[in-house]
Structure formats: structure tokens, C-alpha cells
Amino acid sequence: MLNHKGTQEIRTQRLVLRKIRESDYKDIFRYTSKDEVAKYVTWNTHQKIENTKVLCKMWADQYKSGDKYHWAILLDGTVIGNIEIPKIIDGTAFLGWQIDSCYWNKGIMTEAASAVRDYMFTEIGVETLGASYIKENIGSGRVMQKIGMTEVNPEKYFEKLKNTEKEMTEFDGMPLGFCLLSRKEWICNKLTVRIMKPNDYDEVYALWKNCKGVGLYDIDDSKNGIERFLNRNPDTCFIAEICGRIIGSVLSGDDGRRGYIYHMAVDENFRGNGIATELLECALTALKRNGVSKTALVVFKDNEAGNAFWDKAGFQKREELRYRNKLLVE
């Protein structure tokens, strides 16, 4: 299920991406009035600035729906292009853009498209990103390749469109290319697993609170408690990040005899992509490196997803044992 947030401002190294305003029409006319920009799009070159003014008003009004994704691309405060998701069909978002020819071949559209790609996968939760281009327009095809998209046959692309459009493979006699990027492919390319540090606490704790099946204890899971654990186990606790956002964690440590695993958690929006398995492998490798030969953990009985994961990971359920604990601090 998509988590619609609409067009939010995005900042990159050089650019600001924001909602299009009616007042942007002069900047936008500057590039929509150029024949070379209009050559590879479905609209005609703008002959009159009044037409661009009407278009900007229409675009600005579309944001009222709350599920419109269309950004003006600003460089040094000037609108030099726009990038849009014109449609989303069953979890597939289709992407399109235009940019002033003065800024072609400078990596600007790749920077903007990468930011929109990450926003749609991370914040909105789309499953696939799709785009088409006129093959003669080598620059657009190159941008799609640089942001991780793969060229596919027309049948696979139009399957994502659910036959809502005629299967057109040419535009004005020019052959079209079709590209797709799945969420799973994007995660594989963007995922980073690293050692957890004390300053990760706030974001990791928020993740734990939002994950069903993670039992939290005020003392042990306080900021001081986790920092104490990390200091005792500096190289066995890991987090998973995508685009600087923490989406998974595992705490693990040992007492010199046995290893213990706590708080394995993955943001539910990113599950099913092997992230928990990768976190676990990092933790087990680190424990083995410390000389640990056996690892234990505790799972709530009613945590069906957690128990299924640990069964698949090869952790045996010990029916002959009874878990006991005692509070030393009230």
C-alpha cells in the first residue's frame, strides 16, 4: 500500500526540487519555447508565454489532490527543468522530465532523477519505477541507465501499464525504448550495513518502537543502557541503511562463552528483501571472529514472523529449557 505524501521539497548537492508555482512561468517558458527541448516530448514548442502561464497554473492546481508528484528543478534559484510522475498504476510509478538544453550533459538530470527515485521508493513505497524515451534521445536513455534502470522489451513495460494505453513502440516514426527498476534491485544497490554507534540510538529506538515483536525494557534499552552494551560489544552490533535512513538493526554480543542476539528488526516497508538475513550474517560472523561457538536468543511466542525467520535461519527451538530472569533494579 502506497504512503502518499505528495510533492515534498528535495535538496541535492546542487539542486532544489519543489512544487511548481504559477510564478515560474517565465523560467519554464525559457526552455519550453526551444525546439530542441520539445523535439523528444509529446507537447509542441511553446510559441506564446501566455500558454506557459496557463500550464503553470494547471500544474500548481494539481497539487490539491495530495497524490501529485511533480517537481520544478531549480539551480541557483532558477527553474531549469521539471520532473514528474504522471501516473502510478498498481505500485508502478512512471517517470518523465524536461530540462533546458543549456544544462544538458552536466549530470543535472541524473542528480534530479536519482533524488526522485529515492523519494518514491523510500517515502511513497512504490514497487517499480518505469520510464520510456525516444531512442534517438541518447541523453535520456543514459540518465535512465545511470539511475539503475534496465531496458526491457515493450511487452514487459506495457504489462506494468495494465493495458491502460495503446502499446505504442514509436513516436512520430522514432523507435521508443522502455526501462524499469524494481524496488528490490534498488535496495540491493543502495543498502549499506555498518557497525552501530551510540549516536545512532534515537533513530534505532524509533525503529524498534515501530516493529511489532520487539520487547523494550526501560533500563536496558535506554540511551545509557544501549551505549553501555555497545561499549562492551563494539564490533558485533549492526544497522542497515538506505539513503542515510536506518531501516534495520541487530544487537549481538557475548560473555566469552555464548553469543546472544537482541532486537533484530527491519522496517516493515523494507521486509522481504533479505535485509534481516544480511544483518544476521554480519552479527554471526563477528561473534565467530570473537571465538563464540554457540549463539542464543529469545523470541515472543506470538511473534509468528519472528519465529518463522529464526526457524529458517537454523535456530533450534529448545522445548526442554525454561527461560528465567530476575530484576536486579526495580
Image: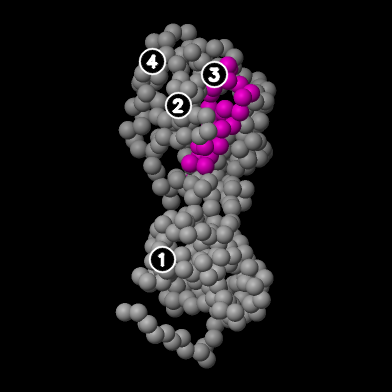
Circle 3 Cα neighbour tier, 10 Å, few/some/many (<14 / 14–19 / ≥20): many
The Cα atoms of the two marked residues, 1 and 4, are separated by: 57 Å
The Cα atoms of the two marked residues, 3 and 4, are separated by: 17 Å
In the rendered image, residue 305, in percent from the top left (x then y), is placed at: 49, 69
Q: Which mark is residue 53?
A: 4
Circle 4 Cα neighbour tier, 10 Å, few/some/many (<14 / 14–19 / ≥20): some
Upstream in the sequence, badge 1 or badge 4? 4
Residue that numbered label 2 is attached to: 72
Circle 1 Cα neighbour tier, 10 Å, few/some/many (<14 / 14–19 / ≥20): few
Q: Quadrant of residue 238?
A: bottom right
Residue appearing at x 65%, y 30% in the figure? 141
| Residue 280 in view, yes or no | no
Amino acid found under the numbered disc labelled 1: Asn
Of marks 1 and 4, the one in the foreground: 1
Residue that numbered label 3 is attached to: 100
Upstream in the sequence, badge 2 or badge 1? 2
Q: Label 2's element?
A: strand
Question: Which stretch is magenta?
Answer: 91-119
Q: Label 3's element?
A: loop
Upstream in the sequence, badge 2 or badge 4? 4
The Cα atoms of the two marked residues, 2 and 1, are separated by: 45 Å
Amino acid found under the numbered disc labelled 3: Asp
